[in-house]
Amino acid sequence: MRILLEIGMYASTVLLIAFAALAVSHKSMIYSALFLAFLGLTNAALFFALGYAFVAFVQVVVYVGASVLFLIISVSMLREPKQSGISYAYPITGAAAVLALGLLFIYVFGSAVDIMPHAIGYSLMASEILNKGGVATYVLFLLLALGLITSVTVSLKGEKE
Amino acid sequence: MTVTPYPFVFVASIAVMVIGMFGLLRHRNPIRMLLSLEVSFNGVLLLLLYVGWVLGNPLAGSSMAVFAIGVSSSELALMVSIMMAMFKEGYLKTLDQEELKEVEES
């Protein structure tokens, strides 16, 4: 079980780097946004493997499911600007491959002790947030509401004119 | 309690941050720059959780991560809305900053 988890984590880190390289270097913006979504999902898998189940859930539902999807839909409605200059896709992909091999070296020869993921439950984290950062939570809530209202207002203004 | 260090997760998070920064410096398109910034943010998020996990205080790390995800989602929506509105209103004829610079100079 332990070796399976470790191999899964290693594969996730390699995928993470590959998706990051593709998101930065792909010619099409839509594909870049799509690779960003895959990057978020791989990151969520790593969070889950580290024991942060609730953070992984928030990452999938809020970040990938709402924000990055919104970005993909918005980008798909735009005209793609013409590409100019040298493409860095091959050097970046090569560097990512070398880095993946380096990670394999670290994985094989690095020090690994026992796996003990921390189980962070929703109620425990909610009580921690409310006890230690109650004011910050309210400020964050206000900021999010303000950001949402501003986004809708700006979009509607663009529609009217 | 023994904690697994998992050094490859640490190296991967740093690598993702560096790749995002490289994209941020290389691209001139604002949406591409935003995408690169989000790539970098994912690396930072992983690093934050990893450090919280290794230092034995995962609760603080996860709380901050949830805050960061919320703020980042809001910021992403706002930035894309502003760019779309500017593009539709005609302030931006193109999203390529090189072309914008040429228009400004001519």
Image (cartoon, coloured by chain):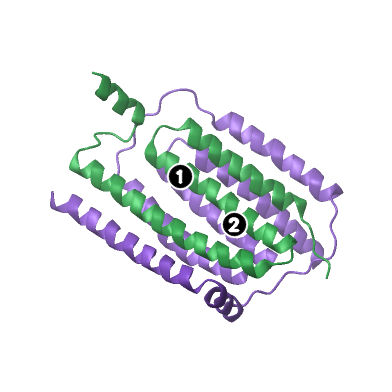
Q: Label 1: which residue? A: B35
What is the chain letter for disc 1? B
Callout 2: SS: helix
Asked whether residue A69 is in view, the answer is no
The spot of residue A30 in percent (x, y) is 41, 45
Asked whether residue B51 is in view, the answer is yes
Q: Seen in the image, is A149 located left or right of residue B54?
A: left
Label 2: how many Cα within 10 Å (few below 14, some 14–19, many 20+): many
Q: Which residue is drawn at 43% across and 58% down?
A: B73
Identify which residue, A123 or B84, lies in the foreground: A123
Quadrant for residue B102, please give it.
Answer: top left
**What distance separates the C-alpha of mark 2 from that of mark 1?**
16 Å
Residue type, numbered disc 1: Leu
The spot of residue A70 in percent (x, y) is 37, 56
Q: Label 2: which residue? A: A43
The spot of residue A24 in percent (x, y) is 51, 39
Label 1: how many Cα within 10 Å (few below 14, some 14–19, many 20+): many
Q: Which residue is drawn at 56% across and 73% down?
A: A132
A23 in relation to B101, above or below: below
B76 in relation to A116, above or below: above
Identify which residue, B43 or A134, lies in the foreground: A134
Identify which residue, A26 or B7, lies in the foreground: B7
Colour green maps to chain: B
Rendering colour (chain A): purple
The spot of residue B3 in percent (x, y) is 80, 64
Residue type, numbered disc 2: Asn
Q: Which residue is drawn at 38% across and 39% down?
A: B30
Quadrant for residue A17, please give it.
Answer: top right
B45 in relation to A76, above or below: below
